[in-house]
Amino acid sequence: MTIFEDLGLWSYLIDFIASILILIIGIWTIKTGNKLIGHIALPIVLNCIIMPASYWACGGLNTGTILYFVVSLFTIGVLLTGKAMYIVYLICFLVQSISIWIPLFYPQIIIDNTMPSETAYIMDFNIALLLTSLALLGITSMIYRAYYKERDKNEKLIERLKSLSEKDELSGLYNRRELFIVLEYLYSEKEDKYVHLQNGIMAMFDIDNFKILNDTYGHLFGDEVLKKIASVIQGHLDSAKYEMAFRYGGEEFVCIMNSEKKEDALARIDDIRNKIEKIKWEDHPDLTVTVSGGAVHCADYDNFTDALKEVDALLYQAKNKGKNHIIM
């Protein structure tokens, strides 16, 4: 641009030297990996050496060079953070301010590059405005992209942490802690988030002979059993009706259903038992895995502790009756 505007040899040389200096700093920073020194050196060289020299060589206030001061100061916020940013900014701002004031006392420092006409002056200012606005637009866009990328990454991390705090990693169901939160909410009779107490049916399942399965076929197969059974239970629930499934303990599962009729709920719970019994195990085709369970109508109990005790007792009644049963 200095050549295009014919601002003279000094302005050409200063801009050329400036480009070489910035290139050297960039290459040195990349080669050494010392980003902090590079990020401090670049704005200091740019703001304290290149910009004042270019300002004096290109005609001072007679050109649009002053606008480039803004962009060069803006790079400090892009490259640095914390105390280093404020210290470097203060140094650069003071140097630039002094460089603007110096010609008032020493006018000879400004190389005489008076614009040939008012049109040329306006053109120069427009070019400077275009370049500085494009630079600021690019820098701002880069900052926003980095911000949104970091925000999305943080949101995913928060979602992941939330999932880990709420869900059991192996089964993918909600964990025991979340069950107690839901039950406490349910018994507070708030209808906006979970099943209403009057329609709440709680069922507990326990895998029959799970210890024998683990000892006979190994813990990896035991994990597979847990995952498949969890999938069957989850597949029988309607999340739109706030129905939820939980891994309560090692081989115990709890689900909360939304049903106005106990008979309908019992039929669905027994269907879960039946589907689990019919699961075909690829590596063990002759194996049949069953569950026993108990179920209660939540509204029949004053608090969730009593409801849990009762459903647990019903589950063990089913076990004592020969297993592979549901008692409500």
Image: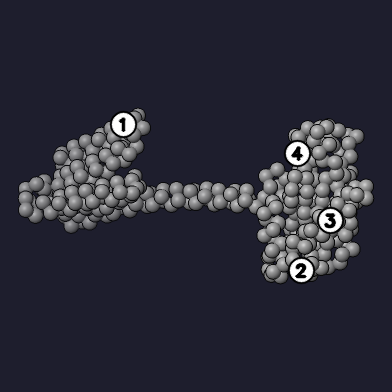
Q: Secondary structure at mark 2?
A: loop
Which amino acid is tagged 2? Answer: Asp
Q: CA distance from mark 4 to mark 1?
A: 54 Å
Q: CA distance from mark 2 to mark 4?
A: 36 Å
Q: Residues within 10 Å of mark 3 (few under 14, many from 20)?
A: some
Q: Would you name the residue on which mark 4 appears?
A: 223
Contact between labelled residues 4 and 2, with CB atoms less than 8 Å apart: no
Q: Secondary structure at mark 1?
A: helix
Q: Would you name the residue on which mark 2 appears?
A: 302
Which is in the foreground here, disc 1 or disc 2? 2
> In the image, what residue occupies the spot 77% across and 56% down?
255
Q: CA distance from mark 3 to mark 4?
A: 26 Å
Q: Identify the mark nearer the N-term, 2 or 3.
A: 2
* In the image: residue 29, left or right of residue 196: left
Contact between labelled residues 3 and 1, with CB atoms less than 8 Å apart: no
* In the image: residue 275, left or right of residue 228: right
Q: CA distance from mark 2 to mark 3?
A: 17 Å
Q: Would you name the residue on which mark 3 appears?
A: 313
Q: Residue furthest right?
A: 321
* Residue 214 in the image, given as x and y percentages of width and height: 80, 36
> In the image, what residue occupies the spot 18% across and 49% down?
95
Q: Residues within 10 Å of mark 2 (few under 14, many from 20)?
A: few
Which amino acid is tagged 1? Answer: Trp
Q: Would you name the residue on which mark 1 appears?
A: 28
Q: Secondary structure at mark 3?
A: helix
